[in-house]
Image (cartoon, coloured by chain):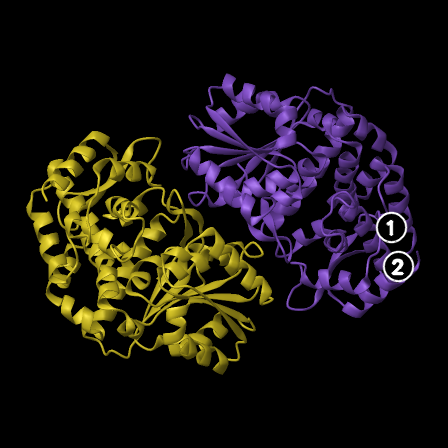
Chain colours: A purple, B yellow
Amino acid sequence: MSATDGADDFETIRVDLDERSYDIVIGAGVLAQAGTRIAELLPSSRAIIITDETVNSHHGDALRVSLDSAGIAQSTFAVPAGEKSKSYDTLQSVCEAVLEAGMERGDVLIAFGGGVVGDLAGFAAGVVRRGMPFVQIPTSLLAQVDSSVGGKTGINSPKGKNLVGLFNQPALVLADTALLDTLSEREMRAGYAEVAKYGLIDQPEFFSWLEKNHAAVFAGGAARRYAVATSCRAKADVVKADERENGARALLNLGHTFGHALEASVGYDATRLVHGEGVAIGMVLAHEFSHRMNHCGPEAAERVVAHLKDVGLPTRMQDVAGADFDPDTLMNAIAQDKKVQRGALTFILTRGIGQSFVSKDVPRDAVAAFLRDKLAAR
Amino acid sequence: MSATDGADDFETIRVDLDERSYDIVIGAGVLAQAGTRIAELLPSSRAIIITDETVNSHHGDALRVSLDSAGIAQSTFAVPAGEKSKSYDTLQSVCEAVLEAGMERGDVLIAFGGGVVGDLAGFAAGVVRRGMPFVQIPTSLLAQVDSSVGGKTGINSPKGKNLVGLFNQPALVLADTALLDTLSEREMRAGYAEVAKYGLIDQPEFFSWLEKNHAAVFAGGAARRYAVATSCRAKADVVKADERENGARALLNLGHTFGHALEASVGYDATRLVHGEGVAIGMVLAHEFSHRMNHCGPEAAERVVAHLKDVGLPTRMQDVAGADFDPDTLMNAIAQDKKVQRGALTFILTRGIGQSFVSKDVPRDAVAAFLRDKLAAR
């Protein structure tokens, strides 16, 4: 198992999408190679780094040193950290900053940060001058295993998350697993929820491996790289099969329909609930609801709960600070979710650990009754 | 020549772009078939009509009647008429209106208006829920022969026109040539500049035909349909060869680099200069500059001037109301134009009528000196 390789090695995963194909390079220290790798891929480009203020203060200089040493002239534009930057206004300010920097179509935008920066900057890269190349350098675990792979970009609408955006593939992804050392424990755990998700979708062995090795993943080194690489490979495979989310790609939303509704219900207040925590609770709900719909026994959800608790993630709606979820509000959020197709509710359900499937005709009443019961159980 | 066909016929041009291929249907009265044609292409869709207030008052009911009769539920969102609606703010309001109307990915957005509406609504269609199908129903001559074909969408930045946008192909274009009867003479003439452009790019026979038949094109009927169809076919051929404007598609910018600079210099004030007028003057300048650079003799520009004057279009910078163009301001606008590649100036020049070519290394000084001389000649 590659988890036993030396920690200094990099693993490269090819995302095979015809003329939009690109590499994901994973490993501790790959940030220092950003300049040479970008110069090789996009010769004689200039660059603009789009980042957030927190990432810029931790790691901005390291990236700039690497670009300088490869002769890549660059400027930096930092947005405030946090989900609020996924807005129409911030998108406009990023587009204007890119134009102000004099970027032309052959230059490169570097999205340097977590999921917010990746989604926002990837969107801007897709629309400034009708598209310029961009490189993702994800700095959170969540971004490394999820949002930086697959080309989904976007901002939030007052009507819901990610309702405005683009499919826009990067030219390169550099996932430096050593950068995760500066994350808070809470951010690290939240990203881990998406790692566990890949096991739950269709890799029961990976889920078993995580049950045994999660502490090593959190500690860093080869186990972390293995977990990130396995997650990226899983996502890349799904994206390859269904780039624009017409079918199989929907499996990646395991736990997300419930999770998004919870996030919406707290007004996307990250002090109460971050995305990965919503996904963790959402995955538990998806397994419990699958049991209630007779797709699987109760033990799948029990195993999910036990593992997520082991790593310190919330598993019940009641775990959310100041929890006061209302079933009707949650149902409205679910109905507005972009995964609704022509009025029917689509959920990712499961037949057991690693056996998820897309269910396109889930009765709305069954979901509402399930949520009422779960909330009454407090 | 198809210009002699009956006026009731429709002509269909296929834009062949693999899975993004679509038809342009051209002729007087095709608007009445919008409902049945959309229902056939996108069964069981609902629709949102994005239009402007002027077009809505003239033709909105006709479109709604056609959709109703085909059983297509629809709502309408009208933006103020005019270039100012190609803004970040209006884009946001359109996206929110589409979400508010409950549109899902399988529903259809109908861009019903001139170039502004097509560019704005086509952009919104590309980003709401990361893309939904859209149909262009262009109502101005300019939109019928240019902006509705080829998939360029976008808004203006304070730094220049169309600097933010997408390549996004429609599912269908319906060009009802009878709708042009409600245009002002000035709008009709401005659109005609783009018709003449196709002759000047690479169809000298079409330009000769226009020299003889322009009055019939303005009058309507078969000659108008022939001119629109010939223009659309010419644009479709170029777009097929170069969808994302990496090469040959640049020829479509004949007259546009100068024209955009003039528009920018008057602050996009349509009371002084509309796009087509800028293109008309720009095409004259492109021919005159080509002569100055020894690519052609003086007679090409003389013929262009004579024809554009015949139809009532401006041909000199001095024709613009309150003309006070400054060569340095124009040069700055040209340098910021999106067709600048890595600092060198790219222009569409010509070897004669219908013999245009892309020139990627035009000396900046030669352009500046040319503009100074032209402006001094007042």
Q: In this view, does A246 lie to the left or right of A96?
A: right
Q: In terms of depth relative to the viewer, which is nearer, A149 or A189?
A: A189
> Alpha-carbon neighbours of circle 2 within 10 Å: few (<14), some, or many (≥20)?
some
**Count of marks placed on residues:** 2
The image shows residue B122, relative to residue B296, as above or below, that is below
Same chain for labels 1 and 2? Say yes or no. Answer: yes
Provide the secondary structure element on which disc 2 rests. Answer: helix
Q: Residue A316 carries which label?
A: 1
**Disc 2 residue type (three-letter):** Lys
Residue B259 in the image: state x and y as whole percent: 25, 48
Q: How crowded is mark 1: few (under 14 residues within 10 Å), some or many (20 or more)?
A: some
Is residue B149 visible in the rendered image? The answer is no
Residue at point 34% right, 38% down?
A: B336
Label 2 chain ID: A
Residue A211 position by quadrant: top right
Looking at the image, which is closer to me, A16 or B323?
Answer: B323
Q: Which of marks 1 and 2 is nearer the N terminus?
A: 1
Residue A70, position as x, y percentages in the image: 49, 19
Measuring 47% from the left and 51% from the top, which residue is drawn there? B88
For numbered disc 1, what is the local secondary structure? loop
On the image, the x and y values in percent for residue A81 come to 65, 37
- CA distance for labels 1 and 2: 9 Å
Q: In which quarter of the image is the N terminus of chain B?
A: bottom left
Determine which of the numbered discs, if any, sits on residue A374 in the image. Answer: 2
**Above or below for B259 versus A289:** above
Question: What chain is tagged by disc 1?
Answer: A
Quick one: A143 or B376, which is closer to the camera? B376
| Amino acid tagged 1 | Arg
Contact check, label 1 and label 2, Cβ < 8 Å: yes
Q: In which quarter of the image is residue A32?
A: top right
